[in-house]
Amino acid sequence: MSKSKLISVGLASLAMAAHSFGQTVSPASTDTKPVTAMAAPAVVADPKPAAKSLIDYFLPMPIHGTLSKDAWGAPGIIPRDPQNGLEDTTIKQYNYWDGKIIKGPDGKYHLFASRWDAVKGHNGGWQGSVAVQAVSDSLYGPYIDKGMLWPDNQGGKGHNVTALVMPDGTYAVVVSETRPGDVFTSKSLDGPWTQLGTIKVDRDRWRASNYSMIVRPDGDFEIVPRSGQILISKTGILGPYTVMGPSVYPKVDADGTPLRNLEDPVVWFSGGLYHITVNNWSTRKAYHLVSKDGITNWTIEGVAYDPTTDFLRYTDGTVNHWNNIERPGVYIENSHVVAFTFAVIDVPKNADRTNDGHGSKVIVVPFDGVAMDKDLASVSFPDPAPVAPAPAPVQ
């Protein structure tokens, strides 16, 4: 892992040109009003560096049968396994995006994602996406699309789809970007899904975008949105959430290169630590951040994933290079990450047009989270910074 550096938690969100599939995000998503929830962390010494970065723990993808030379896509992803993850193998009906897997009591794997009409291309279609569920007998697929989650609620509308198991054992699906942080719940992964409500944040102006959510070990709910601010709720999934301070995104990478245009965070807890990966849409490279308390003193631990490298490989050594790798999700078993999901597209988004043989899908990539958590256990991370009393939520 590359040498860790303490992140300066200034308003990095002001330094980035927020990106939303080619659109500019309203400044409402990065409220800059004074925040008293977190004291500025003291500068501490660099943690002891570990040997590898997160990208080094990805494992080869298993192959279903043989790799196909006839699958749709640009030359960089051929041959490939069209049965990995979720895709329209004809790319004439749907583009798929997002991706979060939950294993059901019946042993089946349920993938929650978004889709839209492929004929509209990427930039012309994602705004009209709907939330869907797909099911597989195998973690790595193939996943079979079972249809919209809530067809009678705004026509199934949903994007930035993620899902989680609630503390009481029921299930929740959260959508943002095209909806204001709406939450749907069900007693069964097979539905029906009912809208519980909309997430509330203690800000007068707020836009829900790129929400990633977990239930913390202490029972609180934590959201990391596109802006990189940490949101905490002690009163349930709908909040109100307290903004714990400014963006925790790094301003520079481990080599001192300025970082801007960060999006698509995913947050999780494993190995006694909180983790975030966040993607730089302009360079297409993502970074791994770690914190002891999930709120303060986040450190940058190196590269998380990078489409220009050979980390997406099969067990026979074949490598795929998707143009964009975004919207990550983590699948955890026995307290360790065993796979990542990624939304991938074979060409630049504005180059995906009507019936052109290009498109997007969700892939599932094995990951050695046991080894990563073991290695990180030997790294000395800074202790949590003092946190001031949270501000009263806006009524």
Image (cartoon, helix red, strand yellow):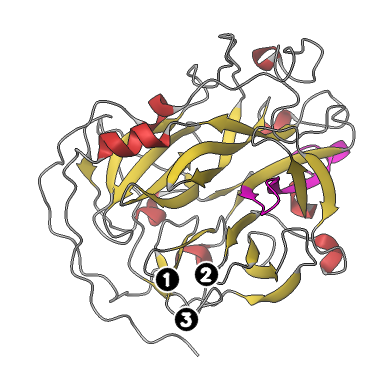
In the picture, residue 142 is in which quadrant? top right
Q: What is the three-letter code of the residue carrying label 1?
A: Gly
Residue at 58 percent across and 61 percent down: it is 165
Q: Are marks 1 and 3 in contact (CB under 8 Å)?
A: no
Name the side, left or right, on which 11 lies relative to 71: left
Residue at 62 percent across and 21 percent down: it is 62
Q: Which mark is residue 167?
A: 2
Q: Residue 378: percent from the left, percent from the top?
A: 19, 38
Residue at 28 percent across and 60 percent down: it is 293
Real-space CA distance between mark 3 and mark 2, rounded to the nearest whole angstrom:
12 Å
115 falls in the magenta region: yes
Which of marks 3 and 1 precedes in the sequence? 1
The crowding category of the residue bearing disc 2, from other C-alpha atoms within 10 Å (few below 14, some 14 to 19, many at least 20), is few
Name the side, left or right, on which 69 lies relative to 170: right
Q: Residue 352: percent from the left, percent from the top?
A: 76, 30
In the picture, residue 92 is in which quadrant? top right
Which of marks 2 and 1 precedes in the sequence? 2
Q: Which mark is residue 219?
A: 1
Quick one: 60 or 127, which is closer to the camera?
Answer: 60
Segment tinted magenta in the rendering:
101-124
Q: Residue 79: percent from the left, percent from the top?
A: 71, 11
| Quadrant housing the N terminus | top left
User: Which element is circle 1 on?
Assistant: loop
